[in-house]
């Protein structure tokens, strides 16, 4: 069998990747390495540059790596995971109190089972999710009332209170979810400094551009796979790339994450205890002129157990209009991308994804058999 074409939805229109007919295989440590972040917390710049060098090696290869000694307590992660399960096991009417399509302007809240299709080449996504975005009053490093946020940033703040109001009946839900999210945000602000060093920039290059950042918390719930889903090769989350600078992904021990190599081979990225997966996003790839790879990935829950993952998507302040960074261009390698704001970049694809799904749903309903009973 020859390679098949995989269509990917992007903010700028469809792109295509070749996929080999081989079944997914386990990754090797060279393909998705484990990076020890302990030296990142050192006062010695030489130690931090060691981490930066390891990040660069992974980022130019498959764009994915694991991190250990990341500083987020295991107890914080476990409590958040339990809250995700508590939320998802509620009656449908309780989850619908924070329904995204009904209540949100900015894609916050609950999205139901098979209510999105991120990949036009694959099935609707067999998952449920709960999402929330950055609010300055919740920032663990410098909390501020939104009235104190500079006006040019304020219009880009995407947090919405209904996600917490509609879940207030769940004991400690907000507290435990925000504890994990806060840990991710603090870690991401440290990690972005390592990315700056890895690109031969000053360590603080992005500090003033991540004061009110893209910081999206998403909790995914994948139910046990049904016989129909297995027979029809349904996906939990279809093939896609991430949008912002990078993603921090905690996954439970069920597994299901797969990464597509440049040769077109799917690799399994199994859970490794005590680690978080990091992957490069599209905006980082733009900023570094394609030196780092924002790679295609997907999720399939092939087990008889429920699966939980808790990605955190990190980007620049949404008002920041940024082009390729100076260390990634030269006379022989000019900038490939025009400047654009991180907010506009994200909004473009979110809008495309939702509009395409709603259009396809309407088309399916229009050709569905009538449910009207006709008497003889």
Image: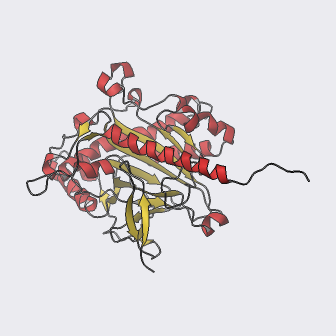
Q: Residue at x 51, y 60 (%)?
A: 253
* Residue 27, picture quadrant: bottom left
Does residue 155 lie above or below 242 as drawn?
A: above
Q: Position of residue 17 (x, y in %)?
A: 38, 65
**Can I make out residue 184 in this image?**
no
Q: Is residue 208 left or right of residue 244?
A: left
Does residue 21 lie above or below 185 as drawn?
A: below
Q: Position of residue 34 (x, y in %)?
A: 33, 61
Q: Residue at x 38, y 28 (%)?
A: 136
Residue farthest front in this picture? 376
Residue farthest top in this picture? 147
Does residue 92 lie above or below 298 as drawn?
A: above
Q: Residue at x 39, y 42 (%)?
A: 348
| Numbered label tally | 0
Residue farthest bottom in this picture? 1
**Colour option used:** secondary structure
On the rendered image, what quadrant is the N terminus found in?
bottom left
Does residue 226 lie above or below 158 as drawn?
A: below
Q: Is residue 365 left or right of residue 121?
A: right
Q: Residue at x 28, y 43 (%)?
A: 190
Q: Nearer the viewer, residue 177 or 36?
A: 177
**Can I make out residue 352 in this image?**
yes
Q: Is residue 243 left or right of residue 54?
A: right
Q: Position of residue 41 (x, y in %)?
A: 25, 46
Residue farthest left in this picture? 331
Q: Position of residue 274 (x, y in %)?
A: 41, 56
Q: Is residue 252 left or right of residue 185?
A: right
Q: Nearer the viewer, residue 231 or 137?
A: 231
């Amino acid at each position: 069998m020859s390679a098949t074409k995989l269509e990917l939805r992007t903010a700028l229109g469809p792109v295509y990747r070749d996929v080999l007919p081989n079944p997914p295989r386990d990754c090797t440590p060279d393909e998705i390495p484990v990076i020890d972040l302990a030296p990142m917390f050192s006062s010695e710049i030489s130690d931090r540059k060691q981490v930066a060098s390891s990040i660069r090696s992974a980022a130019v290869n498959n764009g994915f790596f694991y991190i250990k000694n990341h500083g987020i307590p295991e107890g914080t992660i476990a409590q958040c995971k339990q809250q995700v399960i508590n939320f998802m096991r509620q009656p449908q009417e309780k989850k619908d109190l924070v329904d995204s399509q009904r209540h949100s302007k900015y894609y916050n809240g609950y999205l139901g089972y098979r209510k999105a299709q991120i990949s036009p080449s694959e099935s609707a996504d067999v998952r449920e999710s709960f999402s929330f975005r950055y609010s300055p009053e919740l920032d663990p490093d410098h909390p501020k009332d939104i009235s104190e946020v500079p006006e040019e940033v304020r219009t880009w703040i995407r947090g919405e209170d209904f996600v917490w109001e509609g879940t207030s009946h769940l004991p400690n839900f907000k507290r435990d979810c925000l504890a994990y999210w806060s840990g991710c945000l603090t870690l991401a602000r440290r990690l972005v400094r390592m990315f700056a060093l890895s690109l031969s920039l000053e360590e603080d290059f992005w500090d003033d551009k991540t004061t009110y950042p893209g910081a999206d918390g998403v909790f995914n719930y994948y139910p046990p796979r049904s016989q129909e889903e297995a027979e029809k090769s349904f996906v939990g989350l279809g093939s896609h790339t991430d949008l912002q600078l990078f993603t921090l992904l905690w996954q439970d021990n069920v597994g299901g994450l797969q990464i597509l190599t440049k040769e077109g081979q799917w690799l399994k990225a199994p859970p490794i205890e005590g680690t978080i997966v990091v992957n490069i996003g599209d905006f980082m790839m733009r900023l570094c002129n394609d030196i780092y790879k924002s790679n295609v990935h997907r999720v399939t829950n092939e087990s008889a157990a429920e699966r939980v993952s808790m990605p955190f998507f990190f980007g620049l302040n949404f008002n920041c209009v940024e082009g390729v960074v100076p260390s990634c261009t030269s006379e022989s390698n000019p900038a490939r991308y025009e400047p654009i704001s991180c907010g506009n970049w994200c909004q473009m694809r979110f809008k495309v994804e939702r509009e395409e799904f709603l259009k396809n749903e309407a088309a399916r309903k229009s050709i569905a058999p009538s449910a009207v009973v006709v008497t003889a």
